[in-house]
Amino acid sequence: MNGLSVGNEKGFTILEVVFAVSILAIGIMGYTALKTSNMYSWYFSKNLSLAVQLTDSNLEDLQMAGYNDTGWMDAGTHSQYSTNDFGDAPDQSAGDFTASGLKWTVKDKCPSELTKMVQYETHWNNDNNIVTITQVQVRP
């Protein structure tokens, strides 16, 4: 007879069940946190892509306006909010993305005598996020 045999015990002890359920709960919480983080990252990257497209499109419209265009290319800071003054630029809202502000700054003679530096910003999500693109225009 085997001296290590305790009896006819079958099944799991309550301690084993508690440990197994605890490990399962930790795994489910980790998976849930990962999915939540993934959804936030997807949402932010989608809005960032839309903001970059809008910023680039409006910056191209400024470039098409011309180096000497008064009003658009005057030195200083210009802004537009909730209107699309460029006409051809895409709508400033798409789905749940809405640009809350568009601002561009023009600096004359920067970095050289015959150039202008244009820094264009798109604000979205109630100004909590900003995309900035900088471009140097050369006088024709």
Image (cartoon, rainbow, N blue to C red):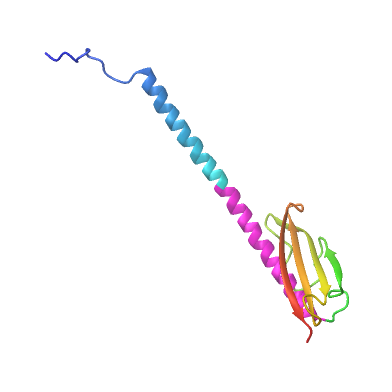
Residue 12 is at least partly visible in this image: yes
The part of the image, by quadrant, that contains residue 89 is: bottom right
**61 in relation to 91, above or below:** below
> Looking at the picture, how far across and down is residue 138, in whole percent?
76, 82
* In the image, residue 133 lies in the stretch drawn in magenta: no
Q: Is residue 54 left or right of residue 34?
A: right
Which residue does the image show at 75% across and 58% down from the upper left?
A: 123
Q: Among all residues in the image, which is located at the extreme front?
A: 112
Question: Percent position (x, y) of residue 73?
Answer: 84, 75
Indicate whether 49 appears above or below 28.
below
The answer to whether residue 37 is left or right of residue 87 is: left
Quarter occupied by the C terminus: bottom right
Q: Is residue 89 visible?
A: no
Secondary structure mainly formed by the magenta segment:
helix
The one nearer the camera, 106 or 40, is: 106
Q: Quadrant of residue 107?
A: bottom right
Residue drawn at point x = 78 percent, y = 73 percent: 117
Image quadrant assignment for residue 77? bottom right
Residue 71 x/y as whole percent? 88, 74
Q: Which residues are magenta?
A: 38-67
Q: Quadrant of the N terminus?
A: top left
- What residue lies at 59% left-to-right and 51% top-to-bottom? 41
Of residue 84 and residue 67, the one placed in the foreground of this image is 67
Q: Position of residue 50 (x, y in %)?
A: 66, 62
| Residue name at image x 43 percent, y 32 percent | 24
Q: Is residue 94 left or right of residue 39?
A: right
Residue furthest bottom in the image: 140
Number of marks = 0
Query: Is 57 a magenta residue?
Result: yes
